[in-house]
Amino acid sequence: MSYEMWTEKYRPKTLDEIVDQEEIVSRLKSFVKAKNVPHCIFAGPPGTGKTTAALCLAHDLYGENYREYIMELNASDERGINVVRETVKTFARTKPMGEVTFKLLILDEADNMTDDAQQALRRTMERYTETARFILIANYSGKIIEPIQSRCAPFRFTYLPREAIIKRIKYICERENVEILDDGIEAILEISEGDLRRTVNILQTAASVGKPIDAEVVYSVVGRANPHDVREMMLSALNGDFISARNKLRELTQKYGLSGIDIIKQIHSEIFRLNIPDRWKVKLADIAGEIDYRLIQGASDEIQLSALLAKLVEAGYEIKKGL
């Protein structure tokens, strides 16, 4: 297995390598063809290819030496007004050599910038449009001030479809000679929730164990309980066997090293998969929310989770009575 980070190794290098974002790729290719790029906002959930698309655009626009024409800044680390006044302005005011008459400044996590920094950035974008174009990358575009939004072409990224992620997982496994089972793929899909970057990171971590990747390996390396075990615990409680459910709870916390908040999140997910009336799913979700709040406030994990199991036992009695 390669020691190189797979997220970098298998990151698309050109726009043609980006999959399942056809509309966005088509618009970016038109910019490359015209040798002209407007200020842009790339918005969408994490792991959907926003930064990758910006780098691929730069590669296709400037060629192999594109790094000489771009600057990447992470706004979560460097987000003050001084960075805009000094670093950004210094880069933006100089004109590049070559066929393309402007440089690209890629500002990642721009939605974490302070309001003062965004106001300063707005003025910089206006003043140096001839020599620099800005690509602002954000998870939540609504956190970017309206004057900047109105100056930018918006691009909305969405999670990749399930089939595309499965195809990518199998492609990487074939290239790295890693054996992965179907239940391992399903486990990765459930945990990553459509985030391709997280998918690849989980895959690499699971492969480092040196075993065929199955669901048990995946859940163990990411520190999550197997949903089957969580469901078994909940069904024991609903069937009235509180002691068995509590023993299972202790087994989960010891085996996977989970906190109460981690377990309550998985219990909440499993509630909606139980074969119980919908109105009881609503009630149990409300109870899980109350327990989650108490845990966040610093209550005892074991006491609160035991209380939740007790509520499940009571719910099981009520469901059997048809109430």
Image (spheres, rainbow, N blue to C red):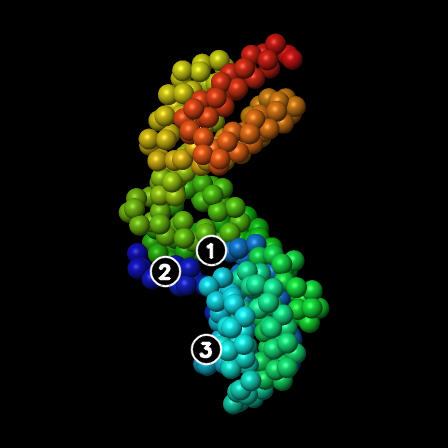
The answer to whether mark 2 and mark 1 are in CB contact below 8 A is no
Between 294 and 176, the one lying in front of the other is: 294
> Is residue 60 visible from the viewing direction of this image?
no
For residue 67, the mark is: 3
Q: Which residue is mark 2?
A: 5
Q: Earlier in the sequence, mark 2 or mark 1?
A: 2
> Is residue 236 visible from the viewing direction of this image?
yes
Residue 296 in the image, given as x and y percentages of width and height: 48, 36
Q: Which residue is mark 1?
A: 197
Residue drawn at 57 percent across, 68 percent down: 117
The amino acid type, in three-letter code, at marker 1 is Arg
* Callout 2: SS: loop
Residue drawn at 37 percent across, 52 percent down: 204
Q: Is residue 168 left or right of residue 208?
A: right
Give residue 122's quadrant in the image.
bottom right
Question: Mark 1 to mark 3: distance in Å?
Answer: 22 Å
Residue mark closest to the camera, 2 vs 3? 3
Give residue 318's quadrant in the image.
top right
Question: Mark 2 to mark 1: distance in Å?
Answer: 11 Å
- Neighbor class of circle 3 (other Cα within 10 Å; few <14, some 14-19, many 20+) is some
The amino acid type, in three-letter code, at marker 3 is Arg
The amino acid type, in three-letter code, at marker 2 is Met
- Neighbor class of circle 1 (other Cα within 10 Å; few <14, some 14-19, many 20+) is some
Residue 68 in the image, given as x and y percentages of width and height: 46, 81
Q: Earlier in the sequence, mark 2 or mark 3?
A: 2
